[in-house]
Image (cartoon, rainbow, N blue to C red):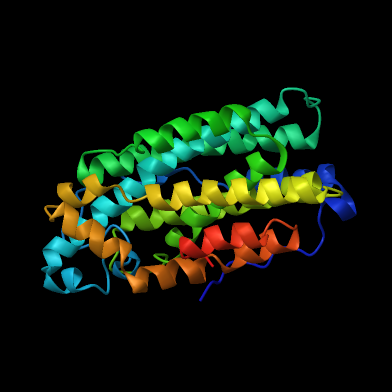
């Protein structure tokens, strides 16, 4: 069950971006946390604790998973979540670049500028937090494949409006769902529990900001723009979904890489988890006219719809 708080019905179209971003910026002052001081980074890790809830492993529910010992499963989930976090860093750096570029011409006294810079600062701290956690948990990091890296660089250097913020929203929503799925799970490392709590709390503000930017950008948009943007955002989501758990993570966990990748791609359980976790995102995209039939087919083939 998704227990995320329901976003207020009002949007920028009702009260304006300044009012929304003022509330978000004020909230960031009152409700922000710092993993650098909250987590004891020198404390040893419990060897029995997972990197994420086992149900969120890409192999959970497969024959391969059933063959693994509990120790192997723990190692696997740690490498999978390390991959998700370090690939997440790469996406967060793209996010920062797009937000900064979007705010270059904004009045620096505006509430929108204030919150946008707060978001960039949050993302910098999240990236450091993810990097330290991955290093401590598995001693390595992961990078996207060459194709995704090239397309990602092009996207972050050119995307604006609903494309930029739609892409940001998709990346944040996907990671948010996975982290929410492990909240409160005593099988998961306490360090990861704290990281998930911090990221979920602060990303909820970032996602609200992205939604409002998309709403504002799509107000009055014509059919061609809607169709084009919908497909491009869906293709961006495909790149994100396919990149989070790198094949190398399976090798590093001591598994047969080819067999693990095949099991992941055919894992109906994981597909259902992704689909149920994408409900709120799909509802929002439909609301703003960005869930067109062509885009829906892309989401469906990636098990998000």
* 190 left or right, relative to 234: left
Residue 80: x and y, percent? 28, 53
Seen in the image, is 248 located left or right of residue 160?
Answer: left
- In the rendering, at what x and y percent does residue 160 appear? 68, 34
User: Could you say which is closer to the camera, residue 277 or residue 229?
Assistant: 229
**Residue at 47% from the left image edge and 54% from the top image edge:** 175
Q: Place residue 294 in its image quadrant.
A: bottom right
The percent coordinates of residue 198 (x first, y second) are 48, 51
Q: From this viewpoint, is residue 210 visible?
A: no
175 vs 6, left or right, is left
Q: Quadrant of residue 73?
A: bottom left
Q: Position of residue 42 (x, y in %)?
A: 24, 41
- Residue drawn at (56%, 36%) of the image: 95
Q: Is residue 113 above or below residue 238?
A: above
Of 36 and 131, the residue lying toward us:
131
Residue at (17%, 52%) from the top-left corner? 257
Q: Residue 134: tell me if it is visible.
A: yes
Is residue 193 or residue 236 the one in the foreground?
236
Considering depth in this image, is 6 or 144 the residue closer to the camera? 144
Image quarter hosting the C terminus? bottom right
**Number of on-image labels:** 0
Residue at horizontal 33%, vertical 36%? 143
Q: From the viewer's perspective, is residue 87 above or below residue 59?
A: above
- Position of residue 288 relative to residue 70, above or below, is above
């Amino acid at each position: 069950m998704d227990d995320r708080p329901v976003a207020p019905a009002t949007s920028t179209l009702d009260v304006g971006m300044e009012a929304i971003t003022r509330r978000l910026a004020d909230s960031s002052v009152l409700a922000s946390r710092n993993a650098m001081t909250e987590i004891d980074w020198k404390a040893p890790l419990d060897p029995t604790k997972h990197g994420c809830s086992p149900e969120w492993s890409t192999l959970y529910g497969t024959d391969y998973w059933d063959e693994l010992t509990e120790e192997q499963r723990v190692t696997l989930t740690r490498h999978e979540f390390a991959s998700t976090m370090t690939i997440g860093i790469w996406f967060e750096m793209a996010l920062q670049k797009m937000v900064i570029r979007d705010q270059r011409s904004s009045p620096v006294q505006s509430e929108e500028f204030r919150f946008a810079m707060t978001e960039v600062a949050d993302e910098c701290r999240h990236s450091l937090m993810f990097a330290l956690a991955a290093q401590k948990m598995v001693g390595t990091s992961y990078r996207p494949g060459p194709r995704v890296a090239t397309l990602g660089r092009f996207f972050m250097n050119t995307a604006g409006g609903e494309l930029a913020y739609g892409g940001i929203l998709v990346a944040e929503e996907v990671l948010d769902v996975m982290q929410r799925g492990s909240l409160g799970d005593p099988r998961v490392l306490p360090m990861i529990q704290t990281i998930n709590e911090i990221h979920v709390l602060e990303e909820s503000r970032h996602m609200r900001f992205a939604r409002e930017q998309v709403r504002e950008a799509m107000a009055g948009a014509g059919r061609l723009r809607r169709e084009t943007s919908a497909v491009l955002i869906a293709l961006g989501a495909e790149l994100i979904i396919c990149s989070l758990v790198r094949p190398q993570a399976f090798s590093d966990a001591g598994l047969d890489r080819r067999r693990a990748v095949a099991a992941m791609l055919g894992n109906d359980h994981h597909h259902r988890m992704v689909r149920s976790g994408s409900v709120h995102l799909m509802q929002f995209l439909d609301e703003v006219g960005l869930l067109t039939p062509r885009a829906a087919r892309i989401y469906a083939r990636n098990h998000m719809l």
